[in-house]
Image (spheres, rainbow, N blue to C red):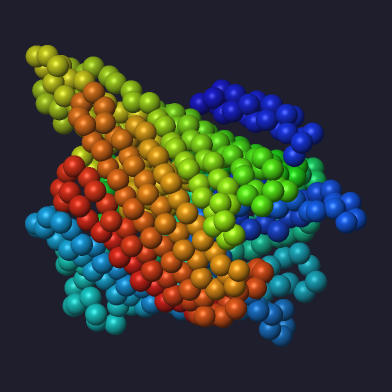
Amino acid sequence: MLARFLNALSFGAVLVVASLGVARAQATTNLLNIPVAHASPAPGAKAPLPLPDTFSAQSHPAPTATPLPNHVAVAGKVRLYSFQRLNRVQNSTNPNRHDLEFGVEPHFDYHVGDTPLNLGYTYDGATPFGFDGPNPIANPKIDNTVPGFPLNQPIHELYLQYKDPNAYVSVGDQELNYAWTPNSDSRIAPASYQGIDSTFKLLPSVSFTFTRIVRFEQRNSSNFEANTLLTAPYPQTTLDRFHPFTPGTLLVGLNVHPSERFNLSAQDYAFYNIANLGYLEAKYGIDPYAKANPYVALQYVAEGDIGTKQLGVQQNNTFGFQLGANVAKGLLFTASGDFAPWRYAYVSAASSAAAQAGFFVGGGGTGDAVKVGPNLYKVAYGGLASPYTDSLGTDALYTTQITQGMADRRSAGNSYKAAFVYTPPSKQWKLIADDAWFQYSNDVARNLTSEFDLDGTYYLNKVRPGPYKGLFVRVRIAPRNQPTLPYNFEYQRFQTEYDF
């Protein structure tokens, strides 16, 4: 795996050399605010347009803290979240589900005098105020991914942070937002991580990241635990196999940003005793002086099992691309694809379940094993293991949708996505409309899935540059078609939030 990652770094270096003479990937790092030196345009010359952010309305930036006396600053949010899942076919395992939850997340910063040190603290709590019934965690008609039960995170964040123009180090409990360790803020509360996070500027346009995670707080849990979404039974997630302890994760990364026209990010994640994941992403603005501002983005994932192989045998290679351009004023169009080849193994076993038990196989109806001879089975695998985004729909693949993606299905195959993002000149509302097709078919079974999403946000205050403060409402509708139960279903998410 290390060799694969070094090869990816070598490929990235070639891209950098090729682009330095003529030239930002989707934001996958935390907000470091480390400045990057870029050449200023000549007097009177037209400035290049920045690379578009394809899904800018899908993630809402946290508000900046408001300074108070005595070096104290405060920020936060109050959120009302309503969720419904409507199934075409309902039974004991697929009932319609709903949920209503109220949440609050105050954040405090204490700046230690005139030093570069900062102490941060965030509390996160939520309650349904009885709207989800007397025992929502045991009610199959309540969607506990939100969750539908009270949530009390007395230490959602508690960290000591050092930051100057060339270095950022944060130690403690904190939200992260890297490609494969995101904050997954798509319900009532985001996810948080315990450990150390750091970034150092090596050159004006080159930075290095080192992050060590020891524990994880899932978005519907009140505890930091030494496990992951794939190895612990969190409410309403699909556990792959139970392991009471997972040693955590080591992330090292390199980001090269020589101009507003080009960005390269290379990251390596050691999910200890699970898998090693190498991730490479490059984004290039083809003509930043044109109104269309076209760009191309590429991503590559190489992952394989390591250590005690808590998920079994696992290997994945995923290639992705994205093409985008402004097709009208305020209207961005993108076309994306992700492709991962299937792998097969022949296993002697008494049943298909026994044959696939030692492999990390697909879920949600993907074909996993078929009998090809007396006590001989063909096992299909090759999906991507994502310990901190599995079943959340928040991973870094270009084609991931609201209810699913290839990483959530743990499946290889092909996927395609077309999306429109509209932001009017006033910027007081945003609309995303996208359609995606997923081909999980393999030599074992045929499986074709599709999903259409609408995602609209309206800001009641005037939107200025920087993080938004004020009241906004957001509506997300996501119908999905699949060949297995419940065949068709639809997510309906309604969110009202006040940021302060």
Q: As displayed, is residue 320 above or below residue 480?
A: above
Which quarter shows the C terminus? bottom right
Q: Residue at x 60, y 69 (%)?
A: 425
Q: Residue at x 23, y 75 (%)?
A: 132
Q: In front: 469, or 454?
A: 454
Q: Position of residue 100 (x, y in %)?
A: 29, 75
Say whether residue 345 is visible. yes
Q: Position of residue 496 (x, y in %)?
A: 42, 76
Q: Residue at x 25, y 59 (%)?
A: 490
Q: In front: 324, or 448?
A: 324
Q: Residue at x 26, y 67 (%)?
A: 84
Q: Residue furthest bottom?
A: 69
128 lies left or right of 86: right
Identify the image quadrant of residue 168. bottom right
208 lies left or right of 378: right
Q: Position of residue 328 (x, y in %)?
A: 57, 56
Q: Tell me how many marks there are.
A: 0
Identify the image quadrant of residue 120. bottom right
Q: As displayed, is residue 123 above or below residue 187?
A: below
Q: In front: 177, or 318?
A: 318
260 lies left or right of 387: right
Identify the image quadrant of residue 412. top left
Q: Residue furthest right?
A: 43
Say whether residue 153 is visible. no
Q: As displayed, is residue 395 above or below residue 16?
A: below
Q: Position of residue 113 (x, y in %)?
A: 77, 74
Q: Residue furthest front?
A: 328
Q: In front: 117, or 79?
A: 79
